[in-house]
Image (cartoon, rainbow, N blue to C red):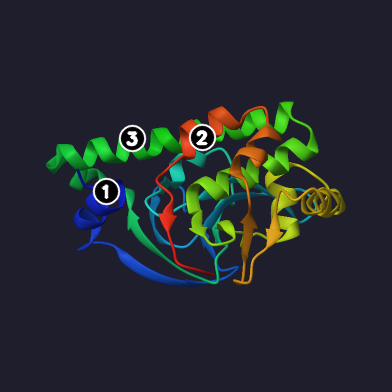
Amino acid sequence: MKNTLDVVSQQFERQAVRIATRKRQSHPLAPQPNETVYLIRKGLFLARIPMPGDQHHILSILYPGDVIRSNALRPLEGADILTASETGEAWRLRWSAVEALAREDHGLECQLFDSMADLAARLALHSAITAGLTGDERVAAMMIELALRTGKETHSGLTFEMPLSRIDIAEYLALNADTVSRIASRMRSNGLIAQSSARDHLACRSLAALEDACPLAPALRRLHAAPVQPQLAI
């Protein structure tokens, strides 16, 4: 069975505006009447909203295959998606075009529903993480999420993407940026994470040890787990 990215890409291909992105590039989520939909094709993106005092709050990390509809964030004016990776690709369509395609293809309609339901479940879990866990547990939760989503086995262990800045992490986890730095230093000292030789990547010798640092690790695994991709070396 084809995955969400394959199925949705095949149907969106003719009508989508393809956007090759660079790091920190922002894309507005236009509300009605010209509502937009983005399909994440390559790289990691951040769904965020503006907050008072020129601050932002990051709602979710977006991965290839995710579909985000601006109307889902209708009460939150100024919502956008921000490119986190050095390079990426997103496809943009009007919601009216997506609706027309979904009416013609029941399989596409199901894939879109599943993708949006998955994103809603991730938002709910993230809300529970930021509301109920300590700072150390929140950072561990984010590391687990990225490891499960982007991890690749190497000779030195599991290597995963970490394109988020210290401020991005603070905005995602509702923490102070200095607190994030202290927690990350403790995790390095405890051997939970290490800097990878690859740019914007971290290494994890034991995912099980990292999961032991977060009480919601089983829920994260149910939502984010995917087959780990083998790779010779980084």
Q: Which mark is residue 98?
A: 1
Give the quadrant of the N terminus. top left
Query: In the image, residue 125 lies at what x, y percent?
Result: 57, 30
Closer to the N terminus: mark 1 or mark 2?
Answer: 1
Label 3: element kind: helix
Question: In front of the other: label 1 or label 2?
Answer: 2
Q: Residue drawn 21% across and 43% down?
A: 108
Instruction: Name, please, the residue furthest toward the front.
Output: 155
Location of mark 3 (residue)? 114
Quadrant location of residue 93?
bottom left
Of the numbered discs 3 and 1, the one sitting upstream in the chain is 1
Image check: 146 left or right of 215? Answer: left
Q: Which residue is mark 2?
A: 221
Q: Residue at x 47, y 62 (%)?
A: 43
Q: Quadrant of residue 123?
A: top right
* Observer able to see residue 51: no
The quadrant holding residue 162 is bottom right
Tell me if residue 78 comes above or below residue 214 in the rendering.
Answer: below
Name the residue: 80% across, 50% down: 180
Label 2: state its secondary structure.
helix
* Residue in the foreground of this view, choosing between 11 and 208: 208
